Amino acid sequence: MKIDKNVENDGVIFMSIKENDERAQETGSEGDVTILAIESSCDETAAAVVRNGREVLSNIISSQIALHTIYGGVVPEIASRKHVEKINGCIRAALDDAGVTLDDIDAVAVTYGPGLVGALLVGVSAAKAISFAKNKPLIGVHHIEGHISANFIENKELEPPFVCLVVSGGHSHLVVVKDYGEYDIIGQTRDDAAGEAFDKVARAIGLGYPGGPKIDKAAREGNPDAFTFPQAKIEGAEYDFSFSGLKSAVLNLINQAKMQGQELSQADVAASFQKAVVEVLAGHAIRACKEYGMNKLAIAGGVASNTALRELLEKECAANNIEFYRPSPVLCTDNAAMIGAAAYFEYRKGVRFGLDMNAVPNLPLGDRERRFHGRASRLDKLEQDFGGRR
Ligand code: KG4
Ligand code: ZN
C-alpha cells in the first residue's frame, strides 16, 4: 500500500490513499485479515480484534451505564471524558486477549458516526493515532452498519440479501441488506426510536435507566393484556414507525391513575407497553420479508436483545418459513466486534479513509450506488464536508 503523508497548510498531517486499482490489488489476496476495531459512539467504550469479519478474537466493553444511571440518562460530556479515560486500556486489553500486537493487525476500524460527537471523537482520534503511528489502513464504519454486521459473527453462513430490523436507542430502521455494505432503508421512525421509547416509559413508571432491560425484566411478571395501547400505522409509509403516541398513552394512563389515587402495576404497564412495541416491530419486519420475497430476517441493536421481541419473531418466522437470525444479547448492544465485522467487508472492497476522517454525528446510512455513481447525495456532501473519504 502506498500511503501519502502530507502536511497541510495549517500543519495538520493527513494521509490519503488515492488509486482505486492499487487498493484493489492489495486487497485481492486471500490471506487472513485481522482488524482492530474501536467503538465509542455513546456510553460504551469498546475495542475488539476480529479475523475475517466473522471470528472474534477478543471483545472488550467498558460500560458507563452505572455512571449515567445517577442522571437518568447519558450525559454527553461525562461520556466523552470517560471514553478518554478508558480507551487505551480497552485497546490494550483487546490486543492482549486476542494474543496479537499492533504489528499483527491489518487495519484499524472505528465508528465515525452517527453518535455523540464528543464521544465519537475519542474513538476516531485513537484509531487515527494507531493508523498513523503503525502505518495501518484506517476504515471508518457507520454505527448501524456495525449493528447489522453483528449478525455475521455467529451465523457463519449468513449472506445478503436479507431484511434487517435495526432497533437501538437512537435508531429504528427496517433495512433490505442487498449486499455487504449496500442497504435500502424501507422504513424508519418518525419520532422516537424504539429504545428511546423503552427508556422514557421506564423512567415514567419509576423503573429508571437503562429502560429497555428493566422493562424486559419487569414485563415477565406482568399481564401484557392489562392495558391496550395504540399501535401507530402511518398512512402511505407502511414500514415507518412512530412511538411517540404510544409513549403519550402510557404517560396519560399514569397521570389519570395518579389523579384518581389508583395504584398501577408497574409490571402490567411494562408488559402492555412492551407488547405494543414488539407487535409493531415484528409485524413490519414479517410483512417486509413477504413483500420483498426474502426468506431471511435478522435483527440488530440494543432492543434486539428484548426477550419478547425475540420470542415473537421466532414464532412468526417459523410460521412464515423465514430463517430468523439474532445475535447474542452482548452483540446486540454496543460493542466493537460488530464494527470489526462491518469493517472487514469494507476492507475487502478496498475502502480506506484518510487521516482527515472526522466524527459525523448525524451520518446517514447511505447506499453504495449513490456514493459510487456520483449522484449528489446528502452523504456525499457530508463526507466532503467532514472528511470521511471513499
Ligand atoms: O444499540 P444500543 O446499545 O445503543 C445505541 O446504539 O443506541 O441500544 C441501546 C438501547 C437503549 O435504549 C436500551 O434501553 C435498549 O437498547 N435495550 C433494550 C434492551 N436492552 C437494551 N430494549 C428493550 N429490551 C431490552 N432487553
Ligand atoms: Zn448502537
Image: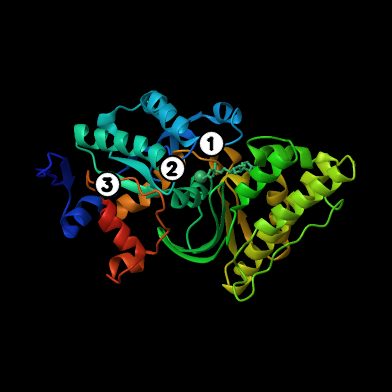
Residue beneath label 2, please?
116
- Label 3 sits on what residue type? Met
- Label 2 sits on what residue type? Leu
Residue beneath label 3, please?
357
Residue 249, quarter of the rendered image: bottom right
Q: Are marks 2 and 1 in contact (CB under 8 Å)?
A: yes
Q: Is residue 113 above or below residue 315?
A: above
- Label 1 sits on what residue type? Val
Q: Is residue 59 visible?
A: no
The foreground one among 321 and 370 is 370
**N-term mark: 2 or 1:** 1
Foreground mark, 1 or 3?
1
The residue at 44%/27% (across/down) is 82
Q: Is residue 182 above or below residue 328?
A: below
Residue beneath label 1, please?
74
The foreground one among 147 and 328 is 147
Q: Judging from the image, what secondary structure is the residue with disc 3 in?
A: loop
Ligand 1: quadrant of the figure: top right
Name the spot of residue 13 as percent of width and height, x first.
Answer: 15, 40
Q: Is residue 61 above or below residue 304?
A: above
Query: Could you tell me how far apart the alpha carbons at marks 1 and 3 are, in whole angstroms?
Result: 25 Å
Name the spot of residue 9 as percent of width and height, x first.
Answer: 9, 44
Residue 183, quarter of the rendered image: bottom left
Tell me which colouring the rendered structure shows: rainbow
Foreground mark, 3 or 2?
2
Q: Judging from the image, what secondary structure is the residue with disc 2 in?
A: loop
Query: Could you tell me how far apart the alpha carbons at marks 2 and 1 are, in whole angstroms?
Result: 10 Å
Q: Judging from the image, what secondary structure is the residue with disc 1 in?
A: loop
Query: Could you tell me how far apart the alpha carbons at marks 3 and 2 are, in whole angstroms?
Result: 16 Å
Q: Is mark 3 within 8 Å of ligand 2?
A: no
**N-term mark: 1 or 3:** 1
